[in-house]
């Protein structure tokens, strides 16, 4: 019953949010911009403008989990809301510019934006508080092969308001007497083999919500195709092999937008280059051998952010902001991710894509392969400037879990997923705990 009540509150809150934001844009357009247009837009044109804005806002809000009052922190919800709003409002203003063929006054748009942000702040706090007051946390069991610390992970991610962990069980014992889960409303599961299958089946049969952590092998099933053959249920799993049309469109996108960003950001990149050179007189760019599709080596380009003698021929992973090898200029450009901008040339040349698994150095990849033999499966797709693991992984996400995230992307490639990851990357640009690539055990101790 609490689940249905939660869904009702969630849907009402989302409806109120969208209704206010869309109406504010409608009012701004009708009151201020429509009279300035070369040709006045009547109700059909007004409806079209509002529909375009509503579509964009819903898409961006979905990408940034802006309505996630069920599991998100208030700060995360508000951050997602504001990002979705800024992008949607910006696109709408550019649409008006396109229609008018000139830049109209931006004051009405800014006033509307200020009103919208005030509303979103109130909405984020109130909707979250109402949801928490109406929906009690689910009685939850954590089931795992070993002490994986899932209960502490749930608390650290601020999910204890939704899931009240009242038991931590061993998966083997639980599978042997699966009725021990009777009375629970949710189960977090980290198990393998028959134990996992038995527990998931019982949860589904008894209406228990089950959240399970997949294994690498599950990624192949995730990306498999159903086949009608042998008069049997058959799945076909194979290597990364997207349609040719997808690859051509993806490559065209990479060429067009990498060239556009290079031209647009060239003044900014020139300033960074001069600052790097002036800092210590060393080279502006830093080149490093990385791996892309099929294990092919290429030279990645970055703005140099460390001393010239930072590695002395040996691969040493950075220790972050505390690394004394980072130059003063390097510390700034790393903070805003500007050291990655020269990789636009890698994308233009075809050695990288905008979206794909982040490339690793050959020696580091070899180290990972010793600990994770499945690591080489990431090399099925071309390396990317950003990727699934960068968007949805955090600083404390294990290398194996990041591998699974990359395999989830590889299993089901699509242009829609690429665009989702690109826009989601904007969200993590100013989040300190976001991370690039993997972190080996040695690197985590560094």
Image (cartoon, rainbow, N blue to C red):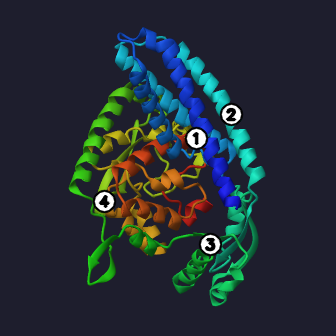
Q: Secondary structure at mark 3?
A: loop
Residue 178, quarter of the rendered image: bottom right
Q: Secondary structure at mark 2?
A: helix
Whether residue 328 is visible to the viewer of this picture, yes or no, is no
> Is 197 on the left or on the right of 363, as rendered?
right
Q: Nearer the viewer, mark 2 or mark 4?
A: 2
Q: CA distance from mark 2 to mark 1?
A: 11 Å
Instruction: Evaluate if marks 1 and 4 touch, with contact meaning CB atoms under 8 Å apart.
Output: no
Q: What percent of the width, then of the height, locates residue 155?
A: 72, 60
Q: CA distance from mark 2 to mark 4?
A: 44 Å
Q: Residues within 10 Å of mark 3 (few under 14, many from 20)?
A: few
The dot on residue 293 is: 4
Q: Residue at (51%, 36%) from the top-left corner?
A: 333
Q: Secondary structure at mark 4?
A: helix
Q: Earlier in the sequence, mark 3 or mark 1?
A: 1
Q: Residues within 10 Å of mark 1 (few under 14, many from 20)?
A: many
The residue beneath circle 1 is 80
The dot on residue 121 is: 2
Q: Secondary structure at mark 1?
A: helix
Q: Earlier in the sequence, mark 1 or mark 4?
A: 1
Q: Residues within 10 Å of mark 2 (few under 14, many from 20)?
A: some
**Residue 313 against residue 427 in the figure, above or below:** below
The residue beneath circle 3 is 207
Quarter of the picture containing the N terminus is: bottom right
Q: What percent of the width, then of the height, locates residue 170?
A: 68, 82
Q: Nearer the viewer, mark 1 or mark 4?
A: 1
Q: Earlier in the sequence, mark 2 or mark 1?
A: 1
């Amino acid at each position: 019953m609490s689940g249905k009540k939660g869904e009702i509150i969630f849907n009402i809150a989302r409806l109120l949010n969208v209704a206010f934001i869309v109406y504010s844009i409608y009012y701004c357009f009708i009151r201020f911009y429509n009279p300035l247009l070369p040709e006045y837009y009547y109700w059909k044109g007004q409806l079209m403008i509002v529909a375009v804005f509503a579509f964009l806002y819903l898409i961006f809000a979905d990408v940034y989990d802006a309505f996630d009052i069920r599991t998100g922190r208030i700060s995360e919800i508000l951050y997602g809301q504001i990002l979705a709003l800024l992008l949607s409002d910006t696109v709408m203003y550019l649409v008006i510019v396109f229609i008018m063929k000139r830049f109209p006054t931006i004051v009405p748009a800014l006033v509307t934006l200020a009103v919208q942000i005030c509303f979103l702040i109130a909405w984020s706090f109130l909707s979250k508080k109402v949801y928490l007051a109406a929906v009690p946390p689910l009685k939850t069991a954590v089931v795992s092969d070993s002490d994986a610390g899932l209960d502490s992970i749930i608390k650290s991610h601020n999910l204890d308001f939704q899931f009240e962990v009242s038991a931590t069980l061993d998966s083997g014992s639980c599978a042997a007497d699966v009725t021990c889960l009777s009375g629970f409303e949710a189960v977090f599961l980290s198990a393998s083999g028959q134990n996992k299958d038995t527990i998931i089946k019982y949860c589904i049969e008894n209406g228990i919500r089950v959240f399970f952590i997949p294994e690498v092998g599950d990624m192949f099933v995730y990306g498999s195709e159903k086949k009608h053959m042998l008069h049997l249920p058959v799945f076909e799993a194979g290597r990364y092999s997207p349609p040719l049309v997808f690859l051509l469109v993806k490559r065209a996108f990479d060429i067009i937008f990498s060239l556009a960003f290079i031209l647009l950001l060239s003044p900014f990149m020139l300033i960074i280059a001069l600052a790097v050179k002036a800092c210590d007189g060393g080279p502006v760019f830093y080149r490093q051998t990385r791996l892309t599709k099929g294990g092919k080596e290429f030279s990645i380009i970055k703005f140099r952010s460390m001393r010239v003698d930072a590695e002395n021929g040996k691969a040493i992973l950075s220790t972050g902001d505390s690394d004394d090898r980072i130059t003063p200029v390097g510390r700034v450009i790393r903070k805003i991710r500007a050291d990655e901008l020269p990789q636009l040339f890698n994308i233009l040349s075809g050695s990288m894509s905008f979206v794909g698994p982040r490339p690793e150095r050959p020696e580091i990849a070899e180290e990972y392969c010793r600990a994770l033999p499945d690591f080489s499966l990431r090399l099925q797709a071309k390396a990317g400037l950003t990727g699934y693991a960068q968007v949805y992984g955090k600083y404390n996400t294990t290398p194996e879990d990041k591998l699974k995230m990359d395999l989830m992307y590889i299993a089901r490639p699509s242009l829609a997923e690429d665009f989702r990851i690109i826009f989601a990357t904007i969200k993590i640009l100013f989040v300190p705990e976001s991370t690039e690539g993997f972190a080996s055990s040695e690197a985590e101790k560094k």
